[in-house]
Amino acid sequence: MISVKEKVLNFVKKEIVLIIALILAIISCFIIPPDREYFSYFEWNTLICLFCMLIVVAGLKNTNFFELVSKKLISIFHTRRAVILALVFGTFIFDLIVANDMSLITFLPLTYLVLHNTKNDKYLAFVFIMQTIAANMGGMITPYGNPQNLYLYSYFNINPAEFISILLGQFFVVAILLFICCCFIKNESLEIKNNENIEIDKQKLVVYIVLFILVILSIFRVFPSIVALGIVIMSIILIDIERFKYVDYALILTFMAFFVFSSNLARIDFIVNFITNLVNRNTLLAGIISCQFISNVPSAILLSKFTTNYRDLLIAVNVGSLGILISSLASLITLKEFLKHQPRNFLKYLGLFTLFNTLFLTIIIIITNLIY
């Protein structure tokens, strides 16, 4: 029988990201005591879409849909390098359609299955990091690709054609860098080690695909996310009520904790004054630095109040998604998924994540200064 101490230790190991987020949020609450403004911290639309996508993806996994797709991917692309390129650029392109966090929730389980079923687990950290960069950068040329884009697009009333042109150069630079990094993977043939027939629950699969499309449409604001939430919940209750157990509620709580932490930081005079002074001198640099402290979305909201230079600000809060883990909350999704499969490799993952993100960030800043 497992002792209480062992249960607590197992929980801490499994939910280390949530624990860190809660500690940071609690510390920030002592600096900025809870008040009415706390209610405005949470991006409820993001949290609703996150819950809907998590439960729909959990349902798709249960139908063996990802097993089938992973098998198909391997049969089409044959080699390790080609499959990894397909997974990374699949995430990159899908981010043009949906937000970065939804893109990761969709592709990460598929990536794990492909690598695990072909005994290539040692590449998991590298591929997850490439997919995180792809997800954070892939949607930067569209108003709906990243949450900060949607805010700035509306706030400054930016022309759609101009919006796309602002980050088009960086978009292609990231694509080239991702391709180069993936080409260092040794190109060997892949075989599925467990090649048994995959049974698909076709009835549930159809329902979950419809629900998936429904969630995507709500992300595009075709109809309110609260309507999608109601339809998803009712559908799951009717066809697969067990799925509620498999939602990653800890991830949702992690997002909420970081909303509190980053929003409180944005109310600390020292940080606000420091960033405001930077904005007056260099909007691009201020935005990138701000993202490292309070992540990209709060940075976009905060800095938009101090500058009319939306061009540099837009570049900053997208490029600034690279860097440390909290510069983009979508990065936390990848970390949690990685620790689910390889909990002992946290430091290795953190080191690789910081190395590649810093490398990409440095190159893109240099090229941005050359372009502009």
Image: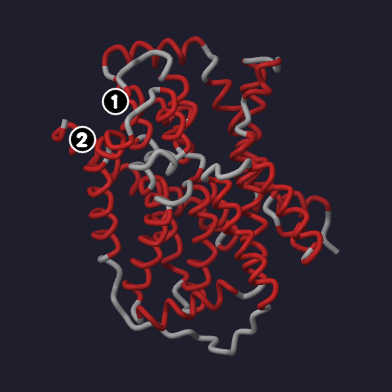
Circles 2, 1 touching at the beta carbon (< 8 Å): yes
The amino acid marked with disc number 2 is Thr
Q: Who comes first in sequence, dot 2 or dot 1?
A: 1
- Location of the C terminus by quadrant is top left
The secondary element bearing badge 2 is classed as helix
**Mark 2 surroundings: few (<14), some (14-19) or many (≥20) residues within 10 A:** some
Report which quarter residue 262 is drawn in: top right
Q: CA separation, marks 2 and 1?
A: 10 Å
Q: Residue at x 29, y 25 (%)?
A: 284
The secondary element bearing badge 1 is classed as helix
Q: Which mark is residue 351?
A: none
Residue furthest to the bottom in view is 196
Residue 328 x/y as whole percent: 46, 39
Q: Which residue is mark 2?
A: 368
Q: Is residue 258 left or right of residue 166?
A: right
- Location of the N terminus by quadrant is bottom right
| Count of marks overlaid on the render | 2
Residue 205 x/y as whole percent: 64, 72
Residue 236 x/y as whole percent: 75, 60
Q: Which mark is residue 284?
A: 1
- Does 75 sit above or below residue 256? below
